[in-house]
Image (cartoon, rainbow, N blue to C red):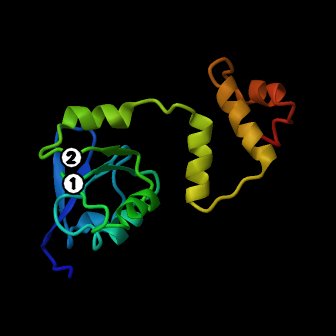
Amino acid sequence: MNHPGQSLPLSLFIPLYDRLEALRWDDPRFARPSPPGTGLVWQLGLGSWSGVFKVVRRRPAGMALIVILPATVEVDAEPQLLRVVESCRPHSILPFHREPRVDDLTALLRREPEDLSVEIMDYLQWRGINVDIEVRQIIRRTIDLSAELRSITALARALYLSRRAH
């Protein structure tokens, strides 16, 4: 049961990334957008994860989720736990930490993606935006060329598109 004022196993991790700010069910920050770069930290070992699932799923677009697993998990007792975590689309999953270090969390948020175009496609699909193969190729090529091209005109030329089409 969700009681106003009751603490959640969730914390906001807001730039300058110097501390975790605990959230409560009645926290007014749920109703307004968070600053860019804000992360949500979910400590599964603190309280019931099933009630928090909806809050985590409704987090604002682009808000990274860092999941910290409980100390021990009886897979037989919690068979849906992995599916719940997967469906929340976490940025990172960490093993149990009683008190997560902000330096470690900051390093996770700042890491470069292994393949930016794949992560962009994954994000678009998660948000219900389906793109065809041609658009996927344009996004991949745009990312590949971004280091060397400095204008939309140069990018359009490299992609063999009119500037207006891009």
Give me the residue at 28% from left, 40% from top: 15
- Residue at (17%, 66%) from the top-left corner? 47
Q: In terms of image quadrants, where is residue 77? A: bottom left
Q: Which residue is mark 1?
A: 70
Looking at this view, is 166 or 4 the one in front? 4
Q: Which residue is mark 2?
A: 96
Q: Amino acid at mark 2?
A: Phe
Looking at the picture, tell me which residue is in the foreground, 127 or 52.
52
**Count of labels shown?**
2
Q: Residues within 10 Å of mark 2 (few under 14, many from 20)?
A: some
Q: Tell me residue 136's x, y (percent).
A: 73, 43
* Upstream in sequence: badge 1 or badge 2: 1
Q: Is residue 150 left or right of residue 76?
A: right
- Of all residues, the one furthest to the front in this rendering is 76
Give the quarter of the figure containing the C terminus. Answer: top right
Q: Residue at the spot x=21%, y=46% of the render?
A: 96
In the rendered structure, the answer to whether residue 5 lies left or right of residue 112 reads: left
Image location (x, y in percent) of residue 67: 31, 51
